Amino acid sequence: MTSDQVRVFLDADVLAAPMTRTLLIVTSTKRGSRFQVCWSQAVEWEADRALRPGQTPVAEVRGRFDWGTAVLGPAATPEAMEALSDTAATDRHVLAAAKAAGIRVLVTRNVQDFGRGDLGDLGVSAVHPDLFLAHMLGEAEYRQSLAAMAAGRLRPPNTPETLHAALGSGHPRLFEAMRTVFAGVEPAASPDSPPAEVFRGNRCLVCGKPLSDPGSLAVGVGPECRRR
């Protein structure tokens, strides 16, 4: 890990979404990636319980990258979970484990489950993967990651273009940021409603500096770190 990389903690709902987790993991392994990923054993078990039949368990994904347990952070302690006051009870182990790992960015599809007070006290920001990827990926990096994903898939979507369209269903911000990479491709229709919130916290998800103005607090990134 280089000094300018952001180490991020993946929630179970992200690990249980195969296409999202694959894009995050594949991108994190690329040279020059702006982030690295980790999670806890408890989060991994929770993600595996949420997988549909036939989907790849998270431990098998770790094995493919020869990570072993290196990507697993320390477990949350009962004391750390009890100290949290406004985070949903079922998610306190996630936030406590992220803090125990010394991580300031938590990538989750359920941003609203993490309390503003707890996040502020711990210096952690919770961000939806769509917003995180839209800020953290460059066009060349995105193209390379989709090419790598396509090479490992036998069934559709199994081309960079069809993967881009499929990702557009649940990642509209990322799709718009990368629209010119695959010109003419339109996003697949999404059966889900937009998330209630995409960012909570008071620190920039890129550089970690405090955020104060409403615009930055809404998008999770300070003016100096905005790439688009």
Image (spheres, rainbow, N blue to C red):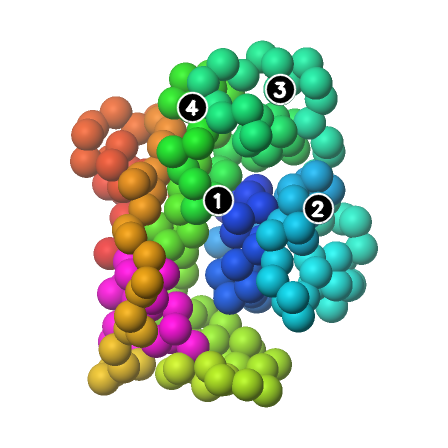
Q: Left or right: where does residue 56 sit relative to residue 217?
A: right
Q: How many marks?
A: 4
Q: Are marks 3 and 4 in contact (CB under 8 Å)?
A: no
Can you identify the residue that label 4 sits on?
115
Residue assigned mark 3: 81
* Quadrant housing residue 142: bottom left
Q: The C terminus is located in which quarter?
A: bottom left
Q: CA distance from mark 2 to mark 3?
A: 18 Å
The answer to whether 67 appears left or right of 148 in the picture is right
Circle number at residue 45: 2
What is the CA distance from the residue labelled 1 to the residue labelled 4? 14 Å
- Magenta segment: 163-181
Question: Residue at the location (73% across, 42% down)?
Answer: 41
Residue type (three-letter) at the residue carrying disc 3: Met
Q: Mark 3: which secondary structure?
A: helix
Q: Local crowd at mark 2 within 10 Å, few (<14), some, or many (≥20)?
A: some
Farthest residue in the right direction? 68
Foreground: 108 or 100? Answer: 108
